[in-house]
Amino acid sequence: MITKKRHQKTTIIPEFKSREEEAAWFDTHDVSEYWSELEPVDIDFQLEKPKEENIVVRLQKPIKERLEQIARRKGLNISSLTRMWIMEKLQTAQQ
């Protein structure tokens, strides 16, 4: 009778110096090989925060259509994309 020895992989997740290094590592490794090292965590987040104010912005149809295309490509609705861009612009304007 012939028996084969199975080689077990060393499945130790290394320590990382940055989130970028960690992301690069997980991009090239199968997380299912590391389940035993992972711990469950509780995540608490709000899906919707109430908006306190509204504004109306009038745009030409081609501009609105372009915003809709970009938002769809990013998996957002047009309102969320526009709000994100306004917040980004406000942050750079304060610097």
Image: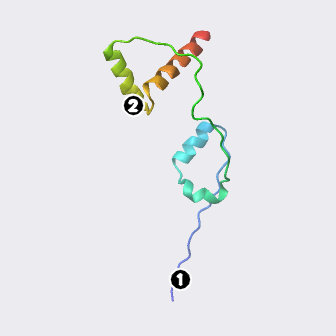
Q: Position of residue 78 (x, y in %)?
A: 43, 24
Nearest to the observer: residue 18 or residue 50: 50
Compare marks 1 and 2 and give the one earlier in the sequence: 1
Q: Position of residue 7 (x, y in %)?
A: 57, 69
Compute the Cα span from label 1 to label 2. 55 Å
Q: Is residue 57 left or right of residue 62?
A: right
The tag on residue 72 is: 2
Nearest to the observer: residue 7 or residue 62: 62
Up-down: is 50 above or below 22?
above
Residue drawn at x 60%, y 40% is: 21
Q: Which residue is mark 1?
A: 3
Up-down: is 7 above or below 79?
below
Residue drawn at x 46%, y 12% is: 56
Q: How many neighbours does mark 1 have within 10 angstroms: few (below 14), some (14-19), or many (20 or more)?
A: few
Secondary element at image label 2? helix
Up-down: is 74 above or below 6?
above
| Comparing labels 1 and 2, the label whose residue is closer to the camera | 2
